[in-house]
Amino acid sequence: MKASRMAALAAAILIAGCGTQTGNKPGQGASALQVTGAGSTFVYPVLSAWAADYKARSGTSVNYQSIGSGGGISQVEAGTVDFGATDQPLKSDELAKNNLAQFPVIVGGIVPVVNIAGLDAGKLRLTGPLLADIYEGKIKNWNDPALVKINPGVPLPNAAIATVHRSDGSGTTFNFTHYLSQVSPAWKSGPGEGKTVAWVGGVGGKGNEGVAAYVKQLPNSLGYVEYAYVMQNHMTFALLQNSAGNFVAPSAAAFAAAAATADWKNAQDFNLVMTNAPGAQAYPIAASTFILLPRRPKDKAKSDAAVAFFKYAFEKGQQQANKLDYVPLPADLVQRIESYIAAKVK
Amino acid sequence: MNPTFAHEPELAAAPVARSGAGADRVFGLVTAGAAWLVLLLLGAAALSMAWGGRLAFETFGWRFVTSSEWDAVGGHFGAFVPIVGTLVTSAIALIVAVPVSIGIALFLTDIAPRWSRGPIAIAIELLAAIPSIIYGMWGLFVFAPFMAAHVEPWLSSKLGPLPLIGALFTGPPIGIGMLTAGIVLGIMVIPFISSIAREVFSAVPTALKESAIALGSTRWEILSRVTLPYTRSAIIGAIFLGLGRALGETMAVTFVLGNAHDLSISLLMPSNSIAAAIANEFTEADTDLYRSSLIALGFLLFVVTLVVLTIAKLLLLRVNRQLGRTH
């Protein structure tokens, strides 16, 4: 019958794939493999750009479905996909329980954006604790003394601050609230950190595009969006004070500085959220997406193909990442990840 | 339809006889099957949602319905805000849509020049074919700024100081909130109500209307004393259909409602609706209790719809009994 013939064909391909995979040369043997992944929407644009390029080079097609981090985790745990992607790293015991390996794949940043008439991008200065106080409703007006003090010469209106947050559960919100929890004890014991939290007032926009649209339309509003949206929509971003005390603008260099100075060495299974990184030029809300791979894959050929794909992405994918306003991982982190994968994924 | 068909399944297997009776029975069975299948699916959907939401109902009990707290980090979920938001936006939608729809239907059946009826009717029905996300984007990019700049400042300055209803129109005019969402929903519901209303209005016997004209009735008197009483049941049915659509609408509401789990009496403030909350939060609902709470929300939407439609149906029965059936 047709079905059994298909199965035989698939088996033949898998055997062929296994035979040549040890050479680790893309472009041979693994030609008809299809690797599937699911999870984070944040990483989707760059993953699909890589996948298109990788298919042209090696013949392996990588099919990624951006169903959200939660979905990605449960799919890879259930074994229905070859890899998952999550914006919130899993703890080592959770990884061990489901026999998963985890590593970061790309860096991005989350940027506070404002809509104040007559204010240019990069002029307003904010600190983490002030940002938390504004989102908690403790600072209600733009001309609050605390804001005026760190913004000498900036024309701040006597108007209420309209806060905008994400209405959908998202890794962006997770990283943003993780940062606020780090810098503000009141935030940590209040709304806390999560993909959705109990916001105090404000309006919720769906997706980055929803928040960007609300901020553009509501006068005197403040929101937070991913870096790419700031660039593409030419939004008025604010400078943010990092843990070294410098006010930094969001940029690829500032995110890279955060990734380089974050304490990966002591993070077991790369379970690290990069917010509030210590570097002098580090951007305080840098974020990463993490790939989840089974440590003992059912289908070795596919797992190897997935590993080869990410190896390619780390080594050759920087250009596509930069073009899409993501930041590639620093070289020593890539090395650390590659030896981690070699040790964990068998 | 004869219900005994349902008890004679062997007839379905019998070769279709040349006689009409056999074919008729098969036909009866098929239609009965289709009708019961809908009921079965509805029951199964309700049961599976209640089952999926059991963890939330067990954990919170009645507080799930009465609490307005929604805190995914702390694991406290209460559906009061989305329930209120759903009911309020749907009510605004009907207040907007019913008069407009009946006006459209009346214009098209009685007043419009004959040549223009077809094109206008088609245009209105095409409104129903616009995907709801387009309404949402229009609401967000065009209508909400218009409301913020022109309508809401006027409302809060003119109506805000009034006693009682004033509280409904207070707050900053941000253009995003229950009023905007209700009006957008109303526009989406218009084609559903108006196309049914047009059909039933044109089914009113000409003799009745001509008699009224002969007695010297004005257009308004014909509408209120002949057309509306004659078509009352069908019009209320059309409104139910629009209401069902408004209660369950997701995408357009998500864009303009503000998606905030805050309880506010003012219609100008952001709120949340059941369908919007599920659509927003389901993908990243990563704890069992969170996911269960969202499924329980779905079950509550089902219950809310059932309650609203039952109340409306009872109201209709009472009105019919009081007025006596005239047709």
Image (cartoon, grey):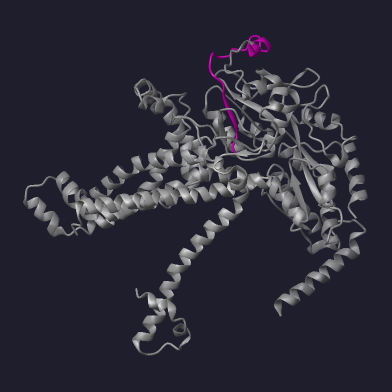
Q: Quadrant of the N terminus of chain A?
A: bottom right
Please check the rendered image and state whether residue A164 is part of the magenta-colored stretch, yes or no. yes
Q: Residue at x 48, y 43 (%)?
A: B252
When the figure is inspected, residue A87 is found, relative to residue B264, above or below; the finding is below
**Location of residue A19 by image quarter:** bottom right
Q: Position of residue B251 (x, y in %)?
A: 51, 45
When the figure is inspected, residue A104 is found, relative to residue B229, above or below; the finding is above
- Residue A154 as seen in the image, left or right of residue A250: left
Q: Quadrant of the C terminus of chain A?
A: bottom right
Q: Position of residue B138 (x, y in %)?
A: 46, 40
Q: Position of residue A246 (x, y in %)?
A: 77, 18
Q: Position of residue B90 (x, y in %)?
A: 41, 42
**Location of residue A271 by image quarter:** top right
Task: Give the camera-side residue of A4 and B159.
Answer: B159
Task: Give the camera-side residue of B162 and A118.
Answer: B162
Q: Residue at x 49, y 60 (%)?
A: B42
Q: Is residue B127 visible?
A: no
- Residue A215 as seen in the image, left or right of residue B288: left
Query: How many labels sit on residues?
Result: 0
The magenta stretch is A146-167
Q: Is residue B232 visible?
A: yes
- Residue A223 as seen in the image, left or right of residue A189: left
- Residue A100 as seen in the image, left or right of residue A241: right
When the figure is inspected, residue B67 is found, relative to residue A238, above or below; the finding is below
Residue ranking furthest to the left: B215
Please check the rendered image and state whether residue A324 is part of the magenta-colored stretch, yes or no. no
**Location of residue B79 by image quarter:** top right
